[in-house]
Image: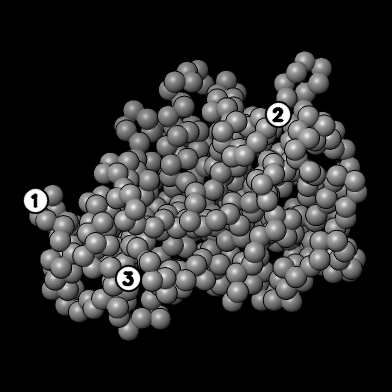
Amino acid sequence: MFRFIDLELKQWVKDPRRKPLLLQGARQVGKTFAVRKLGQNFSNFIEINFEETPQLKDIFDGNKDLDPHRIIRDLSYSLNTKITPGKTLLLLDEIQIVPRVIIALRYFYEKMPELHIIAAGSLLDFAIEKVGVPVGRVMFMHLYPMSWLEFLKALGQDLIFEAIVKQDNHESESEVVHKKILEILREYLAIGGMPEVVDCWVKTKDLRACTKIHQSIIQSYRQDFGKYAKEHQIKYVELIFESALRQLSKKFKFSELPGEYRKRELAPAVDLLEKARVLHRVRHSDGQGIPLGAGADPEQYKLIFLDIGLSQALLGLELTDWFLNPTSTLINKGTIIEAFVGQELIAYSDPYLQASLYYWQRNAKGSEAEVDYLIQLQGSVIPVEVKSDKGSSLKSMHLFLENHPSSPYGIRFSTHNYSVYEKIHSFPLYAISLSIKWQFPDL
């Protein structure tokens, strides 16, 4: 399946200033698949998964030096295959099991820069926390679930794909095309972007089979709890994992969770799930300037799951509604639509930077207001509202624009076609990449 990261990885290979690459992302978002695909361009591709071959951990044992020539020699003998810099792509996978691999990357950069080496892991942030990172000696790249545009490519909808990425946002799409794209979008809203689920949907169109894969992925996330949470924390991680999405797209409050727990007991569990990239925080910002993080309040945030398909599986929502009652489902599942927009904003963010999401809220008595997202665009703060139907009430956005004169306009996502009216730029839900002026990489 086509992924935009394929293009980024090919650029990394050709970059004369290339450094060893740390590929980060949650479990089962496609990291290993992407590197294997890249490996097809090399004379030799070697994949080492430390979960599957734990005996190779000894090569990075703390009693041994991290000289890359010794490491490559030992790996070559152990695998009975030659590793040739310039011709070999070496993947070291699940390196959270062997954190010293991260330290070793520094010496590969300094003493063997011609070797193409990628290290990956689903719990990589925890390994980095243990040993640090060799600053200036490695590059980071981040991978997330498949975006809506990647979903279109997987479906073979190349013409629709081109219609979106080449659309002039000053012109409305023809109504027949607009409706057709919304119909296909409902498939993505039901299925989500986990690659294995998308592959199943493309090949079978079997919702039940897709749901089984959702549940399998969720179970694999549960099994990871013991790998990064201390024994006494696991019950708190499980509680957040199971219950936090009941507050999906709302300001998160520990007091609304079941049971009598204290914030100081539960807060670290949110941190752990965020570090495992299972959850994303949407942090509150005053929106007064760039960077948005400078005006963020760490105590106020919303939570979204990494994927809308997994979110619905965790919440026990019925996926068939997207196909049997599409109009009412769009309206009734507004929180899923809002999470979808957040997932898309993350998907089209710079892959070399870890994505961050922000929102704005005013709690003045009698004058409450909330803007779903704030984004940085061409040096300005742009408020974003999400409407699951064709609703036109944008009081919070207007209030934000009145109180933030440096913000030139606001963006609304809904089932409306493209339009601009005064300071409101309306985009259909399927055109998030176009609204943020994301530059589609050349194929």
Which residue is under mark 1? 63
Q: Nearer the viewer, residue 258 or 402?
A: 402
Identify the amino acid type marked 3: His
Which residue is under mark 3? 116
* Residue lying at the far left of the rendered structure: 63
Residue 361 marker? 2
Q: Which colour scheme is used?
A: one colour
Residue positioned 73% across, 25% down in the render: 362
Closest to the camera, between mark 1 and mark 3, is 3
Quote the CA–CA distance across marks 1 and 3.
26 Å
Q: Mark 3 or mark 2, which has the lower sequence index?
A: 3
Residue 307 marker? none
Labels 2 and 1 touching (C-beta < 8 A): no
Relative image position of residue 176 (x, y in whole percent): 89, 69
Relative image position of residue 391 (x, y in whole percent): 87, 43
Quadrant location of the N terminus in the rendered image = bottom right
Residue positioned 48% across, 56% down in the render: 352
> In the image, is 440 to the left or to the right of 363?
left
Q: Residues within 10 Å of mark 1 (few under 14, many from 20)?
A: few
Identify the amino acid type marked 1: Asn
Residue positioned 58% across, 65% down in the render: 198
- Helix, strand or loop at label 2? It is strand
Q: Relative to 221, does residue 166 appear above or below in the rendering?
A: below
Q: Residues within 10 Å of mark 3 (few under 14, many from 20)?
A: many
